[in-house]
Image (cartoon, rainbow, N blue to C red):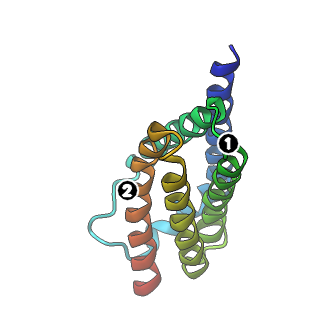
Amino acid sequence: MRKFLYILLPVIICFLVGFTASYFQSESIQTWYPTLNKPEITPPNIAFPIAWSIIYLCMGISIGLILNSKERNKKFLTSLFAVQLFLNFTWSISFFYLQNPLLGFINIILLDLGVLYYAFKCYPAQKVSGILFIPYILWLFLATYLNAYILIYN
């Protein structure tokens, strides 16, 4: 039961962070974001909640596997995870709530670095945990490009 909770609770926390962030960005998504110049490869709006649901699930399972492991660096990896989750949350605030693509871009670069660092550090300890971050990394690269494009062309 404990092993199950070590996976379930992080998944719930990730979804709560995403839900809370969506609260702060919802108005801007309806009013500000549609007015921006965006690249042609911008995914349709429906893709975002689907992608983030998959990503939050993978994120939660990733740290849950670390918590269930006998890894000596468990506290360090958990701290890295918490930092990237915080940066994930603050990007929504920076970009959407504050409607500040420059601050969002600075935030997402830090997020990219934090996510990559976590994935590379946890891979030797728990390979599946690192692999579970691949969808997140790919989505972040797209989001970073979109953020940069919006910053430059708006």
User: From the viewer's perspective, is 125 left or right of 138?
Assistant: right
The image position of residue 89, as x and y in percent, is 65, 57
The image position of residue 60, as x and y in percent, is 58, 37
Residue closer to the observer: 25 or 74: 74
Graded by Cα atoms within 10 Å as few (under 14), some (14 to 19) or many (20 or more), the crowding at tag 2 reads few
Residue 30 in view here:
no
| Residue at disc 2, secondary structure | helix
Residue 53 in view here:
yes
Q: Which residue carries the number 1 mark?
A: 72
Q: Residue at x 34, y 54 (%)?
A: 44
Instruction: Tell us which disc is closer to us: 2 or 1.
Output: 1
Q: Indicate the amino acid at tag 1.
A: Arg
Question: Can you tell which quarter of the image residue 80 is in?
Answer: bottom right
| Residue at disc 1, secondary structure | loop
Graded by Cα atoms within 10 Å as few (under 14), some (14 to 19) or many (20 or more), the crowding at tag 1 reads few
The image position of residue 92, as x and y in percent, is 61, 62
Residue closer to the observer: 134 or 152: 134
- Determine whether 93 is above or below 136 in the image: below
Q: Indicate the amino acid at tag 2.
A: Leu
Question: Can you tell which quarter of the image residue 95 is in?
Answer: bottom right
- Determine whether 75 is above or below 150 in the image: above
Q: Is there CB contact under 8 Å for labels 2 and 1?
A: no
Q: Residue at x 66, y 64 (%)?
A: 93
Q: Which residue carries the number 2 mark?
A: 138
